Amino acid sequence: MLESDPDFETPEPGIDITVTINDIDWDQVKEKTVANVKALIDAKLAELKAKIDELYNKVDWKGLEMYAYINSAVMADEWGFDMFRTSDGGETFEVITRDGFGDKYNYGCPAFLETEEGLYFGTCNPFYGGQLYLLKNNESDPEPQGFTLSGSVTSYLQNEYPDAVVTVTLTGNDNNFTAAVTGTDSYSIADVPAGSYELSVEKEKHVTRTYDVTVSADTTQDVKICPIGDATNDGKVNMFDYNAVYKHISKNPELAEDSYQRACADATGDGKVNMFDYNAIYKHANKTNLLF
Ligand SMILES: [Ca+2]
Ligand SMILES: [Ca+2]
């Protein structure tokens, strides 16, 4: 139950304390509200600007510029420590390594030990530990790194044998070097010592082809092989091919001895180009007995 408050005084009658809504000047209210909000925003913006200015003034802009410059120079540099040697007291220098002996994580080389075997180097490597290297006496020239032999690969019958790859084999005539790689559009063989080589190119239902290659620098040798029976070497086996075989048999003109065209014309693979090859290619072209 509410009880009456003895201190509460009832307003005296006759004093009008009500303000009717019609007494408010709404245009003035709107103007004042907008002005107040604008003033508030301006004040906050000024505060924010002062903070930004303070932050801006705290930055070492010259230092930042220097940092960016040094950083890009460091990133552009090859990783791994550099080491040089001089035999004339610092007049001229010879490079021993510019890339931490080929390991980019070798960032320093603080330890040296002179022995009868040669000079040992101990490297700093934060990822998998320091390493030990030996520069042997009187070995001024590093081992040759070798070269890269590469080129484009052209072959055919992609529709008939979509999974077939070309195998490129490089065999050294004088240094027992052998490397085989597979590919469809290109090949690349790295670390090839300088020398003379036979490059052999093989693929299913194609006639193996060999190229003589001499390597004394990075070398490009594009290769192309053709299907069995493709005497014209255009990738297709059709009437032009059995015509070429016919002309060869008629000696008008003959396909050159040891030529790749002649090897492709030998559809029966017996080392000779004769009527049997003509027949085989003719049957393939007429789809009565396919070669592939
Ligand atoms: Ca052809
Ligand atoms: Ca033959």
Image (cartoon, grey):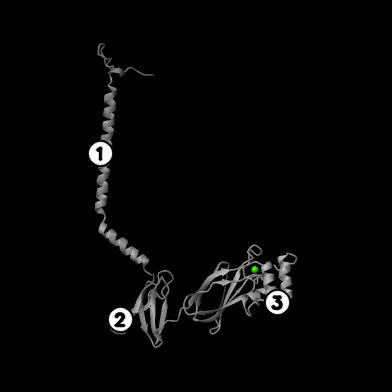
Q: Secondary structure at mark 1?
A: helix
* Labelled pair 1, 3 in contact (Cβ < 8 Å): no
Residue at 74% across, 74% down: 276
The amino acid at mark 2 is Thr
Secondary structure under the numbered disc 3 in the rendered image? helix
- Of badges 3 and 2, the one in the foreground is 3
Establish if 103 lies above or below 117. Answer: above
Residue closest to the eye, 72 or 136 = 72
Residue that badge 3 annotates:
249
- In the rendered image, the vertical position of residue 200 relative to residue 27, given as above or below: below
In the picture, the disc for residue 43 is 1
Q: Are marks 3 and 2 in contact (CB under 8 Å)?
A: no
User: Along the line of sight, which residue is nearer the eye, 193 or 197?
Assistant: 197
Residue 133: x and y in percent read 41, 79
Instruction: Assign ligand 2 to one image quadrant.
Output: bottom right
Q: Earlier in the sequence, mark 2 or mark 1?
A: 1
Ligand 2 neighbours mark 3 (CB distance < 8 Å) = no
Q: Position of residue 136 (x, y in %)?
A: 41, 85
**Residue pictured at 33% horizontal, 17% vertical:** 4
- Badge 3 amino acid: Ile
Q: Which mark is residue 92?
A: 2
Estimate the spatial distance between the alpha carbons at disc 2 and disc 1, rounded to whole Å: 67 Å
